[in-house]
Amino acid sequence: MSPMVAFFTLQSIKTMHLRIREQSKNATQIATFLASHPKIEKVGYPGLLCFPQKALADRQHKNGLHGGMLYFVLKGGADASSKFIQSLRRPWSFGANLGGVESLISYPIVMSNGTMDATQLQSIGISEGFMRVSCGIEDGKDLIYALDATLSEL
């Protein structure tokens, strides 16, 4: 790697534990909120009690930190997804860069998995209502408030 990339890597490692802790905390709060929301069909996050491999995640994830990534499935399919994306409130952003310090939501059916046909998407569990979430380090209450406001417009 170049000297500048090495410098940035060393700088980011110094605060990585803080970022992972905040991202995991936010993801847990958001997954819990979404799991009880009437417009959400399903939520996938290793920190939820209903997660199929929760026991395995608890054994493998240090200090109960399950990371900042999760997914949810909106009820209403493509129409609901389109409305959700169009009305997404800040501090959330719509984008495909996952794992940063900002919170992002992506729509894999047209983004990361956009070249797959319906059969392929179905085989890996991606439906028209499927949204992928990368939680950042913003205030968790602000993130939930914005999600709730966005969902209320569906």
Image: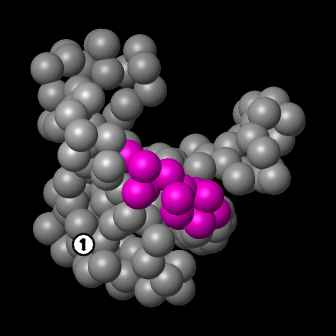
Instruction: Label 1, secondary structure: give it.
Output: loop
Question: Residue, x 24% and y 72% (percent of image)?
Answer: 88
Where is residue 126? Give x, y as percent. Answer: 37, 31
Where is residue 10? Give x, y as percent. Answer: 43, 49
Tell me: 138 left or right of 5.
right
Specify how the rendered protein is coloured.
one colour
The answer to whether one can see residue 118 in this image is yes
Question: Residue, x 82% and y 41% (percent of image)?
Answer: 58
Q: Residues within 10 Å of mark 1 (few under 14, many from 20)?
A: some
Residue closest to the eye, 68 or 39: 68
Q: Is residue 21 above or below residue 133?
A: below
Magenta part, dominant SS? helix
Quadrant of image for the C terminus: bottom left
Residue closest to the eye, 92 or 117: 92
- Where does the magenta region start and end? 9-21
Where is residue 23? Give x, y as percent. Answer: 54, 62
Find the residue positioned furthest to the front.
Answer: 3
Quadrant of image for the N terminus: top left
| Residue 108 is covered by the magenta coloring | no
Question: Residue, x 24% and y 40% (percent of image)?
Answer: 3
Residue closest to the eye, 60 or 45: 60
| Residue 18 is covered by the magenta coloring | yes
Q: Which residue is mark 1?
A: 88
Residue closest to the eye, 76 or 56: 56
Type of amino acid at the residue the image marks with label 1: Leu
The answer to whether one can see residue 24 in this image is no
